[in-house]
Image (spheres, grey):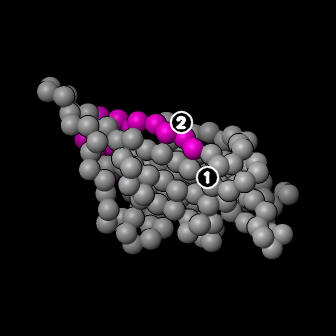
Amino acid sequence: MRKIIMGAALVLTTAVLTGCGSDASPAPADKTATSAQPKAKAKPESGSDEVKHEVTLEVLGTGTTSVYYNLDTNKMEQVQLPWKKISTITLTTDAEKKVGLGVSVVPGSVTGSDGMLHAAPCVITVDGKKVADNQDGKSDKMCEFKVK
C-alpha cells in the first residue's frame, strides 16, 4: 500500500510540475493524440482574445478508486467509477495559446480480471474529440494533454 501511495504522489508531483509551464513536451499516449489538436470551440467575441475549449476527464471501470487530476484545479478525490469531470478551459494569454495549458488525470488502481491491481482506464476529450488515453488501462502512464 505504501508503494502505491508513494507512486501516486510521485505521479501527481510530476503532473503538477508539468502543468506549471515546463517547456518539455511529454511523450503522447499515441501518435494520433498530438496530430489532432481540436479546433477552438467558441470564437472570440469581438474585442476579446479568449479561446474556450470544453475538456472532459474520464476514469472508467467499476468500484471505487482515487483520482488525481489537473483541470480547473489540482485535486485528488476518492470516487465511484465510472467518473467524469467536465470543465471549460479559457485561454486568455498569448503564452497559453502558444504553449498550451496542461490538463491531466492520474487514475487510481482497480482490480483486474487476474485479481491484480492495474491502473484504471482514463480518457481526455477536448471539444468532443478524444486526445489522450492510457490504452484502456494497459499503459502505466497518466492521461495528459496540452490544450492550445
The residue carrying pointer 2 sits among few (fewer than 14), some (14 to 19) or many (20 or more) residues within 10 Å by Cα, namely few
Left or right, 17 with respect to 35, comes to right
Residue closest to the eye, 4 or 113? 113
The residue at 46%/60% (across/down) is 132
The residue carrying pointer 1 sits among few (fewer than 14), some (14 to 19) or many (20 or more) residues within 10 Å by Cα, namely many
The residue at 85%/57% (across/down) is 1
Element type at mark 2 = loop
Can you give x and y, in whole percent of width and height, for residue 121 in the image? 62, 61
Element type at mark 1 = strand
Q: Which residue is mark 2?
A: 73
Q: Which residues are magenta?
A: 84-99
Tell whether position 95 is magenta. yes
Can you give x and y, in whole percent of width and height, for residue 147 in the image? 37, 49
Can you give x and y, in whole percent of width and height, for residue 17 in the image? 53, 50
Residue closest to the eye, 117 or 3? 117
The reply to whether the C-beta atoms of the residues labelled 2 and 1 are less than 8 Å apart is no
* Residue 24 in which image quadrant: bottom left
Q: What's the CA distance linking mark 2 and mark 1?
A: 17 Å
Res. 6 in view: no
* Residue 47 in which image quadrant: top left
Left or right, 35 with respect to 10, comes to left
Residue 59: give its label: 1
The residue at 63%/55% (across/down) is 60
Left or right, 2 with respect to 124, comes to right
